[in-house]
Amino acid sequence: MDVAASTQNQALSALLFLYREVLRQRLPWMDDIVRAKRPLKVPVVFTQLETLAVLARMTGTARLMAHLLYGSGLRVMECVRLRIKDVDLGYLQITVREAKGGRQRVTMVPLNLVDALRKQVERVAELHREDLRAGYGEVELPGALARKYPNAARELGWQYLFPASRRTIIADAVGPSHERRFHVDESVLQRAVKQAIREAGVNKAASCHTFRHSFATHLLENGYDIRTVQELLGHKDVSTTMIYTHVLNKPGIGVKSPLDHQRTA
């Protein structure tokens, strides 16, 4: 019976714990055990034409967010958690502060999105002014920043770039003064992308994350080196980034199918 690599490794860890911690025995073969490796999964990637077709069928804020997923290589939660201060339109940089694994990285702002992002900041600024006039305007701050900078929660720079349409009452708070505006729920973007994929007729098991995969693959196709792509994606190890070389239209060795060398009948 075939067993998944994760199941094999879990069973192995349980046996090792039994011998070492419970039975207090150390057998000579324990140091030679090789753990099962997970099979390589090739990510689903849009072609450049498919990417444009999906994006063209999106509207509103979800359209801008999807463009950032593809144009900047963001994960879904990285996108929805962006703060206004994280987007530098002068230097065309996005600082991702709440990335996977707690690592911080910098990626690019596509030139084609500068005007749309500037208008989005203006919309958020107006919404924030309305919240302040109504006696609200606070946003959740990461870590201990709320205690260190008690006024920061009401500053425009800390507001989410993609705020929720309604304020939320904190569950353990009393009174409307503790209402805060969080970021838009990620499911809003996920549903919009799924709908656009169907309308574009793209028959792939694609999702929001496919834009990030496509970002990396298309950069490699355009000749950018693997280390640059690694930094933009925020991968700790370049081996993680190397997976995108498996989905390139033209692999590095430039091999052609034998069928392409034959004359068609």
Image (cartoon, grey):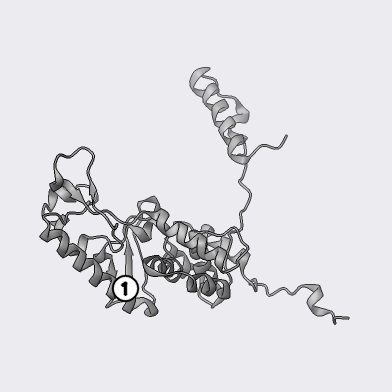
Quarter of image, res 133: bottom left
Residue at 56% from the left image edge and 33% from the top image edge? 10
Q: Please identify the residue farthest to the top as the structure is shown.
A: 23
Indicate whether 14 appears above or below 37.
Answer: above
Give residue 117's position: percent from left, percent from top: 31, 73
The answer to whether residue 235 of the structure is visible from this angle is: no
Q: Which residue is nearer to you in this view: 13 or 198?
A: 198
Specify the quadrant that holds the N terminus: top right
For disc 1, the neighbor class at 10 Å (few under 14, some 14 to 19, many from 20) is some
Image spot of residue 187 (x, y percent): 42, 54
Q: Looking at the picture, how far across and down is residue 95, in whole percent? A: 31, 65
Residue in view at x 25 percent, y 69 percent:
123
Residue matched to label 1? 117
Total of numbered circles in the picture?
A: 1
Asked whether, in this view, residue 137 is left or right of residue 199, the answer is: left
Position of 51 with respect to 131 (left or right) is right
Residue 142's place in the image compared with 163, above or below, is: above
Q: Is residue 259 visible?
A: yes
The spot of residue 6 in percent (x, y) is 58, 39
Residue flagged by tag 1: what amino acid is it? Leu
Residue at the limit of the structure toward the right, as seen here: 265
Q: Secondary structure at mark 1?
A: helix
**Quadrant including the C terminus:** bottom right
Left-right relation of 167 to 191 = left
Seen in the picture, residue 169 relative to 104 is either above or below; the reply is above
